[in-house]
Amino acid sequence: MDRIIEVKNLAYTYNDGTEALQDVNFAVKPNSRVAVLGPNGAGKSTLLFHLNALYLAQKGEVYIKSRKIGEKHKDWVRKLVGLVMQDPDDQVFSTTVYEDVAFGLVNFGWQDRDKIDKKVKQALKSVDILNLQDKNPHHLSYGQKKRAAIAGILAVKPEIVIFDEPLSYLDPAGQKTLRRILADLYGEGKTLLVVTHDLDFAVEWADKIIIMKKGEIFYSGDYEIFARPDMIEEADLRLPKIMELLQELEGVDLKRLENPPRDVREAAEYLNNLPG
Ligand SMILES: Nc1ncnc2c1ncn2[C@@H]1O[C@H](COP(=O)(O)OP(=O)(O)OP(=O)(O)O)[C@@H](O)[C@H]1O
Ligand SMILES: [Mg+2]
């Protein structure tokens, strides 16, 4: 199976007539790291809701592991695809943080209390909020709620993990933790999709870039799109800082670079090797 996710001709219109998705097509290979980019209102969250059957296709098809998703596969899909929503308020509903994280496991059919306890504590610890386990999630700060929502997914560790804007509201330490979590999940063979407005993160992290614009896929391919300032402008994005730096350098033609550097370390290496 070389496509764990496949979306074909997907369209979705909200009740008020907003055409949020129009003829969306893309596929994702297992164990890949996909960054989904695009301006506000481009349809990113709407698209993600289709991948775990929160929404069902009005037009077109969504396949997870080659199975076409319909009403009767909702439970199956939700075990396979975990979604950390953009707004953590949509995701927390229990009276304690602990229960919120345990909820997913119970829903997955877990019964052994000791095992659940171990998993919940492990997950809370990995996002550094074990000390908040007895708190009412509604009383948490926004960033703490984000962490709680991430812990909920880490406890169950589904095969496909989707994060809608995970970096926003996380402090620098929290962002670093999230990067480590993503690396661990990737190492465990998971397929990861991250919606983000952080282009520096996207260029460093992703194997595949999907850019949405006005409900359509504007681009789907590798990170070298970031070496094309014209395309990036057309997509209403901006260049990652690394590409901006290269663009400013005299004698460097960003568009002609093969494998342009993605992060500070690679950029330093590239600059150190420049002739003269
Ligand atoms: N429940 C809804 N009812 C009507 N229109 C909606 C609803 N939810 C979203 N929309 C509209 O659908 C379009 C796509 O919204 P969506 O939330 O998918 O965008 P997004 O790319 O995730 O944006 P952001 O970067 O701001 O999170 C927008 O025009 C939005 O106003
Ligand atoms: Mg969104």
Image (tube, grey):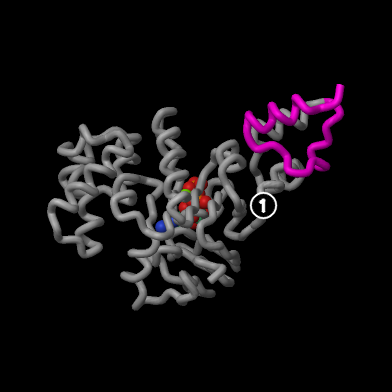
Q: Left or right? Give the position of 134 relative to 273.
A: left
x, y percent for residue 180: 44, 39
**Is residue 180 at least partly visible in the picture?**
yes
For the residue marked with disc 1, what is the amino acid? Asp
Q: Is residue 239 left or right of residue 104?
A: right
Q: Which residues are magenta?
A: 250-276
Does residue 93 appear in the picture of this structure? Answer: no
Looking at the image, residue 194 lies above or below residue 3: above
256 falls in the magenta region: yes
Position in image of residue 153 (x %, y %)? 33, 51
The answer to which image quadrant residue 126 occupies is: top left
Question: Of 189 and 221, which appears nearest the observer?
Answer: 189
The structure residue drawn at horizontal position 77% and vertical position 32%, both measured from the top left corner, is 247
Which residue is at 83% across, 42% downward?
Answer: 256
Residue situated furthest left in the rendering: 113
Residue plotted at (66% across, 55% down): 221
The residue at 40%/76% (across/down) is 70
Q: Nearer the viewer, residue 109 or 82?
A: 109
Q: What residue is disc 1 on? A: 222
Q: Secondary structure at mark 1?
A: loop
Indicate yes or no: mark 1 CB to ligand 1 under 8 Å: no
Q: Nearer the viewer, residue 222 or 47?
A: 222
| Magenta-span inclusion, residue 271 | yes
- Rendered position, 15 above or below 39: below
View extreme (top): residue: 276
